[in-house]
Amino acid sequence: MKPFLPLVGLGLCIAQVAAADTYTITVTNRMSDELLAPIAVTSAVNDPALFDGPYVTQAAETQILTGDPSAVVASIGAVGVVHGNDGPPGVLLAPGDSVTFDYETDATALRILAMVAPTMLPDTYVAGIADLQAADGVTLILDRFDIGNDEGTHVRTQIAEGAAQIQITRH
């Protein structure tokens, strides 16, 4: 990507472009009986496109209720999506399994979000924020939340700790 060099009056201003880094991200499902749906990864600055006060946005609600992150991708644009290889329809991440992928970004923190397949509880997801400023990489434990959709409260509530683990290393 070339820097943009605008002329302002007689001076020359150089717009600084943040350099993107490539990260290897490994997601491990730590739940004993439940699967994770496709996992969305984006800059944490995009949180307003996911969370709306005590609830979630329409796009995030769609992902959490259906497992389909396409509405999140459409609303944000810069979203990485990774799939597991398990369960029907073959895109889920089974208990104890991991998936590894590369992700390029200039973000300083990443938001990770995935639906928990509703085989035991409806409307739950795992989420967390990984601070990418650590030189040696990041290990993050994702907690599990309920969005309160089926209860009619529409309030996010943490219901479990340690549902998934994220390992991130910079290249």
Image (cartoon, grey):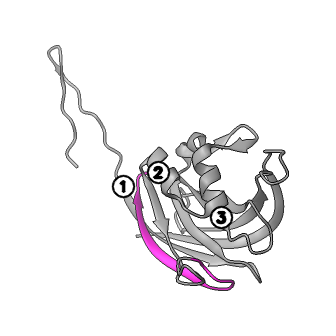
> CA separation, marks 2 and 1?
8 Å
Q: Amino acid at mark 3?
A: Met
Name the residue that disc number 2 marks: 107
Residue 99 appears in the figure:
yes
Name the residue that disc number 3 marks: 115
> CA separation, marks 2 and 3?
23 Å
Is 106 included in the stretch rendered in magenta?
yes
At label 1, counting other C-alpha atoms closer than 10 Å, the crowd grade (few under 14, some 14-19, many 20 or more) is: few
Q: Amino acid at mark 2?
A: Ala
Q: Does the CB distance between marks 2 and 3 fall below 8 Å?
A: no
Residue 121 vertical position relative to residue 147 in the rendered view, above or below: below
137 vs 84, nearest the viewer: 84
Residue 108 appears in the figure:
no
136 vs 68, nearest the viewer: 68
Q: Which stretch appears magenta?
A: 92-108
Q: Earlier in the sequence, mark 3 or mark 1?
A: 1
Q: Which mark lies nearer to you, 3 or 1?
A: 3
Residue 147 vertical position relative to residue 125 in the rendered view, above or below: above
Name the residue that disc number 1 marks: 20
Residue at position x 65%, y 51% from top? 61
> CA separation, marks 3 and 1?
28 Å
